Amino acid sequence: MSKELEPRLLARAREVVASNTGFRDTAISPSAVDRVVRAELARGRSEKELLEELRQPGTPLSKALLDAVLVGETYFFRHPEQFRFLASQAVPAVLRRRPLALHGWSAGCASGEEAYSIAACLLGCAPAGVRVEVLGTDLHEGRLELARRGLYGTWSRREAGPLLYPVYHDVGGGRVGILEHVRAVTRFAQGNLLEPLPEGFGSFEFIFCRNVLTYFSPDSVTRALGFLASALVPGGYILLGTVEVDHPPAGLVRVGPPELQAFRRPHPSDVAPTPPRVVPRPVPTPPPLPVRAPEPPPPPVVSPVMLHLEALHLIEGGDEPGAAKVLEKLQEKHQDYLPGLLELALLRERAGMREAAFALMRTVRDKAARLPPDQIIEGPEPLPARFYRASADAFLMMGAIE
Ligand SMILES: C[S@@+](CC[C@H](N)C(=O)[O-])C[C@H]1O[C@@H](n2cnc3c(N)ncnc32)[C@H](O)[C@@H]1O
């Protein structure tokens, strides 16, 4: 029978794991802690020595404990519906305001499959000329080494949903390697979600933090979410794991159905600015005119962009059917207004009306293809015709892959 371990030592080891990772006690595997402590004792060390070492921060023993308890389960395009959302809605929405670069962060990236999937997805749907950069961070240095190597066995591909975008190629021996252009835009760094990301890493339009917070204590969830949210640009999106939070993180709003676990930092221009109050200037009273029937007022001129903005406000407020009605009206009146067609296609897709979404996307693609690629299309954000063509292509291609 194996020797009973000193309860104080085990309790201290668990405290060290909890304070370093944010894990709640029940998420720390007792057998993993037990194994590490026993391995140290088997090397001839005493329980007293181990207790002493656990009082110091960042020792080899605490690192061994972290390595043993951190679960690294991951695979390519895990939760594919979130990648579809990224490609069909989040990226087009961000590009309308920030058309030059897309920055993604896989927070708690394990061995890198998630970071590379984000990179492949962003590269797949970003129009030519848009820069893509993805950062993967994790506490586990060993897994980051695997991520940097970018070589994977069948295990990483085992449960993958549809391979939504090309991300790896066969390198023989049952292994795959990350495609060079995907690897070139992805980098990895060690980082603890309980601490703010160093400023040098900049901020992000898209943050994925999935299947990590599920192990955290409530206080650690709040702390980590605060740091994640502060790394998000206005108008940027954060995607969490399926059951990780039941309400939007502070300062963010939920986008899409609850099961999508997508949240967005509102953009200042989301709320239409209140027009300045015009104080009428006193004007001299004109001499009385002969009485005539008043002219009817001219009909108000509503531009397609104004209607589109009205629809966007309805979407933000959760009234997608209302937004669809406005966009249908917009389409009737301005059949060539590409931003409205694209928006309506995305709404149809979200409402489960796949065929209608595809028909609209084909129209977007065909109309955009007839324009010079660099022609700027007026919309809530002026964007070149090639943006609409590439977005429609990416959407249609996604349907073809599934
Ligand atoms: C189950 S994996 C999830 C990987 C990937 N996000 C996915 O959904 O497939 C969880 C990862 O979170 C990391 N992790 C746990 N606590 C962390 C913390 N406090 N800071 C940074 N990473 C942490 C673990 O090392 C592990 O690699």
Image (cartoon, rainbow, N blue to C red):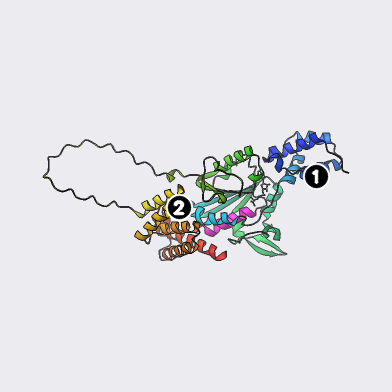
150 relative to 323 in the view: left or right: right
Q: Which residue corresponds to the image point at 63% horizontal and 37% vertical from the top-left?
A: 219
399 relative to 327 in the view: left or right: right
User: Circle 2 sits in a helix, a strand or a loop, which is it?
Assistant: helix
**Where, quadrant-wise, is the C terminus in this rendering?**
bottom right
Q: Which mark is residue 357?
A: none
The residue to which callout 2 is attached is 320
Query: Are there few (<14), some (14-19), or many (20+) residues within 10 Å of tag 1?
Result: few
The residue to which callout 1 is attached is 35
Q: Marks 2/1: CA distance?
A: 53 Å
Q: Where is residue 340 drawn, in percent x and y?
A: 41, 57
Q: Which residues are magenta?
A: 112-126
In reply to whether residue 86 is colored magenta, the answer given is no
Residue 73 or 63: which is nearer the viewer? 73
Q: Which amino acid, mark 1?
A: Arg
User: Circle 1 sits in a helix, a strand or a loop, which is it?
Assistant: helix
